[in-house]
Image: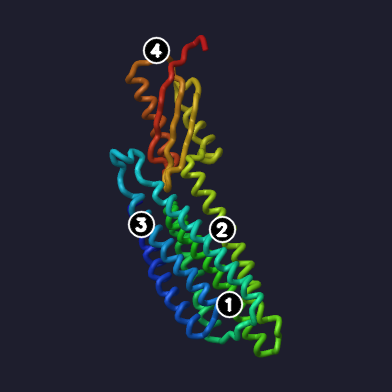
Amino acid sequence: MAEMHKQGLTAIWISLISNVILTIMKLAAGLALASPVLLADGVHNAGDIIATVAALTSSMVSKKPADEDHPYGHGKAEVVASALVAVILVLAAFWIGVQSVGALFEPPEAESWLALGAAFLSLVWKQALYVYTIRIGRKSKSKSVLATAYDHLADVYASLAAVLGIGLAVLGDRFGWTWAAYGDPVAGIIVSLLVLKLAFEMGREAVDILMEKNASAEKIEGYQGLILGIGHIKRIDRIRAREHGHYIVVDVRVGVPGDFTIQQGHDISREIKKRIMDSDPDVVEVMVHLNPWYDAE
């Protein structure tokens, strides 16, 4: 687990450094080449720096052990960062959309091969970062690393739009296609909608976890099967499980014979915890409450 956390932090650090370099490159190229799409993409990347810093901070905080004020640990810090990234993606989507719509009503700007090269470099770089971070995020089940990966994916969409838009404009200048000059803003509008969809999906997941939505029905059914397989369990009165960032907390109430001793009840509680935690490495806490059951029931 510690090794996975270290890999996750490394992935976020690489993302942060990359975002700083790409932001400087895009803003400088956009100003030097008078490319509106590169300037817009550079501003978008500046927002990515904020999102990556939030992911880095939350990843560090989430691994702090439980304390008196946070008895269930700090796992939700990553979820807060995920929600923040979703908000930044929404703002970026609106930014790209507004800039693209506005460009449709202005005389098209002439594009250069240098601008196309900068956009293509950004596309390849961001695609590589997405593949790397999504692999680490899924392996470590880190919400902050996954949020960083989806942020890279949004950048891939934006960079792809820039490549298509600038590429069409360059070809339009070469072959006299006047309509091609507007390929950039049209592609930007499409990308803004894709980024908005990505932000909605990420934000909905973060809200579900913060609102302590129950874990999936498949997981709950799996826990129930494990519990019912333990001897002397007469019924399951309630079972709940909630994600707490990168781990799960399970709450169980079961009925056991009312004449059992405290020791017998204790042994059953330990067996429930052991079976659930052994079957699902994501579970770090199982709270068990025993209710008395009698033959008359």
Q: Earlier in the sequence, mark 3 or mark 2?
A: 3
- Lower position in the chain sequence, tag 4 or tag 2: 2
The location of residue 270, given as percent across then percent down, is 36, 29
How far separated are the C-alphas under marks 1 and 4?
74 Å
Crowding near pointer 2: few (<14 within 10 Å), some, many (20+)?
some
Q: Which amino acid type corresponds to the residue marked 3 in the rendered image?
A: Thr
Sequence-earlier tag: 3 or 1: 3
Q: Which residue is mark 3?
A: 57
The first of marks 3 and 4 along the sequence is: 3
Q: For the residues carrying marks 3 and 4, which lies nearer the camera in this image?
A: 3
Query: Which residue position holds label 4?
Result: 259
Q: Secondary structure at mark 4?
A: loop
Residue 90 in the figure: left or right of residue 280: right
Horizontal arrangement in the rendering, residue 277 relative to residue 119 (left or right): left
- From mark 2 to mark 1, how far is it between C-alphas? 20 Å
Amino acid under disc 1? Val
Residue receiving disc 1:
163
Cα distance between the residues tagged 4 and 2: 55 Å
